[in-house]
Image: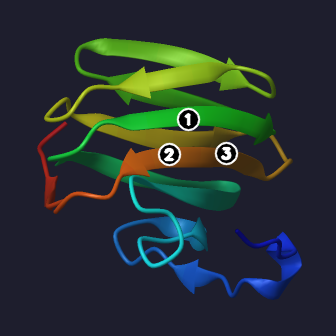
Amino acid sequence: MFVKHAAAVPEEPVTAGQGTTRQVLIGPEEGPHFALRRFIMQPGGGIPSHTNTVEHEQYVLCGRARIGLGERVLEVKAGDVVFIPAGVPHWYEVQGEERFEFLCVVPNLPDRMEMTAT
């Protein structure tokens, strides 16, 4: 068991994204089954279409974004919850002048990210 403050966790650039960083708040060395990550996207930022080999559960903390989930395009905002099944193409585009932040829970399993055509 542990407690730490999110501000003590370093932000890492998301190389596939634009204006996007990630914090691994709880990693595999701390949580045996799931990782908890925080994504921070600046205005104009986002991540292009890609797939992952693990599912994603997400909770939007602040801001607004358009996200693509397979063939669907949705607008999400603070308080929205998103489920992305493994293998489904998805992307993010920040909307407005506020940063977009979300928590993302993924299983601690091998994951491979592959870029896809939009």
Three-letter code, disc 3: Phe
Residues 30 and 39: in front is: 30
**Residue 104: image location, x then y, percent:** 54, 46
Three-letter code, disc 2: Val
- Residue 58 is tagged as 1
What crowding class fits label 3: few (fewer than 14 Cα within 10 Å), some (14-19), or many (20 or more)? many
Choose the circle earlier in sequence order: 3 or 1.
Answer: 1
Choose the circle earlier in sequence order: 1 or 2.
Answer: 1
**Residue 90: image location, x then y, percent:** 31, 35
Q: In 3D space, how far apart are the residues under numbered discs 3 and 2 (Cα atoms)?
A: 10 Å
Q: Residue at x 67, y 45 (%)?
A: 102
Q: Residue at x 41, y 62 (%)?
A: 32
- Which is more foreground, mark 3 or mark 2? 2
Quadrant assignment, res 86: top left
Please report contact status of discs 3 and 1: CB closer than 8 Å, yes or no: yes
Picture layout, residue 90 above or below residue 6: above
**Residue 82: image location, x then y, percent:** 52, 23
Q: In 3D space, how far apart are the residues under numbered discs 1 and 2 (Cα atoms)?
A: 6 Å
Please report contact status of discs 1 and 2: CB closer than 8 Å, yes or no: yes
Quadrant assignment, res 76: top right
Residue annotated with mark 2: 105
- Quarter of the rendering occupied by the C terminus: top left
The furthest residue to the front:
1
Q: Secondary structure under badge 3?
A: strand
Q: Left or right? Give the position of 95 relative to 86.
A: right
Q: Residue at x 32, y 58 (%)?
A: 108
Residue annotated with mark 3: 102
Q: Residue at x 69, y 20 (%)?
A: 80
Residues 31 and 27: in front is: 31
- Which is more foreground, mark 1 or mark 2? 2
Three-letter code, disc 1: Gln
